[in-house]
Amino acid sequence: MVQFYIQPDSEIPASTQLFNQILFAIASRQFPPGHRLPSTRQLAMQTGLHRNTISKVYRQLEEIGVVDAQAGSGIYVRAQTDEGLAKIRSPILEQYPEAHKLVQQSLNDLLKLGCSLHQARELFLAEIDWRLRCSAQVLVTAPMHDIGAGEVIVRELERALNIPVQLVPLEELNQILDQTRSGTVVTSRYFIAQAEEIAAPKSVRVIPIDIYDFDDEIKLIKRLPKDTCLGLVSLSSGTVGVAEVIIHSLRGEDLLVMTAQLEDTYKLSAVVRSAHTIIADQASCAAVKTAIAAAREDLIRPPQLVCCENFIVTKSINLLKRELGLE
């Protein structure tokens, strides 16, 4: 069972602490699509928060489109239809609304049996052609204020898929999709609702990726001695912000947390010179190592650098390969 930690005397509102922790649990698939969230009573017992506060957090999660409230049943993590499979709008689909679901399920069953896309093409020509066209244009999107998160995703997808991947700010996605209707949009579950709102009217599919749960890093943070200075470095401002809130919820004022984005060399230098331990994403590790080497003469003891292995979980990479016909 996922545990949530609240620092009651913190300057960060308790509702913000809980909101960030639940959203992270959803984005990292600790709470997978369709999962029923704990009741307000259960969370109240675990966190000590009033049930009204927890209800407010659940309403906020519902407003941003990551959970659905089902009357008399509970709050559930929103499930993308068939894990983001294609939604084709056509006269045939309007005439036979269940036909496309049957085609998709049959195709997936064939793939599970080891059948290649080319072997299945004779049976499902229209579906296969559509998927192959989509694989030629993969768009990663994230809001401009956290475009670093998109950069991290692009780097990992290009390495894993070995195909060109284009980064598009969420604010420009509508314009780009007007220019190219044949493509696949990929984004984190943090931004899935906004991306689907833009892409759905254009019959462009959106596939959410699940992020790594950082379980090893969280265990390390729990073990750090009191008054340790911990550095966080990432391309993504959103990742740094969420991590800072979660660490505060875990350790309160026990740790001094310093953060830096990769392009901010002044802050990066300050982190390197002050932190006992630095946690960085893969995209930032080389730059952090360079900064440590440059400051080595001024350091009594170089900081311990922990490089996160990845940002996207393997299951999401495999799903994308399957959906894009790359397997």
Image: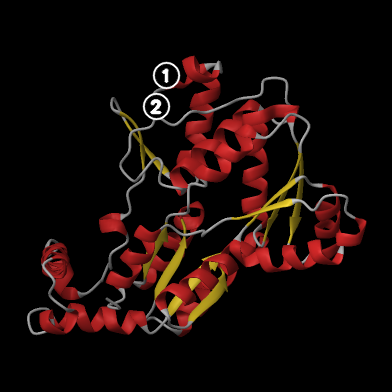
Q: Secondary structure at mark 1?
A: helix
* Amino acid at circle 2: Pro
205 lies above or below 260:
below
Residue marked by disc 1: 42
Give the image quarter of residue 42. top left
Q: What residue is shown at x 17% (from left), y 66% (from top)?
A: 108
Judged left or right of residue 127, residue 184 is right
Q: Are marks 2 and 1 in contact (CB under 8 Å)?
A: yes
In front: 177, or 113? 113
Q: For residue 197, which numbered disc appears in the image? A: none
Query: Is 260 placed above or below 218 here?
Result: below
Circle 2 sits on which residue? 38
What residue sits 45% from the left and 48% below the top? 28
Q: Is residue 73 left or right of residue 282?
A: left
Q: Residue at x 12, y 61 (%)?
A: 98
Which of these two is toward me, 271 or 276? 276
Q: Amino acid at mark 1?
A: Gln
Image coordinates of residue 57 in percent, x first then y, are: 53, 31
Q: Secondary structure at mark 2?
A: loop
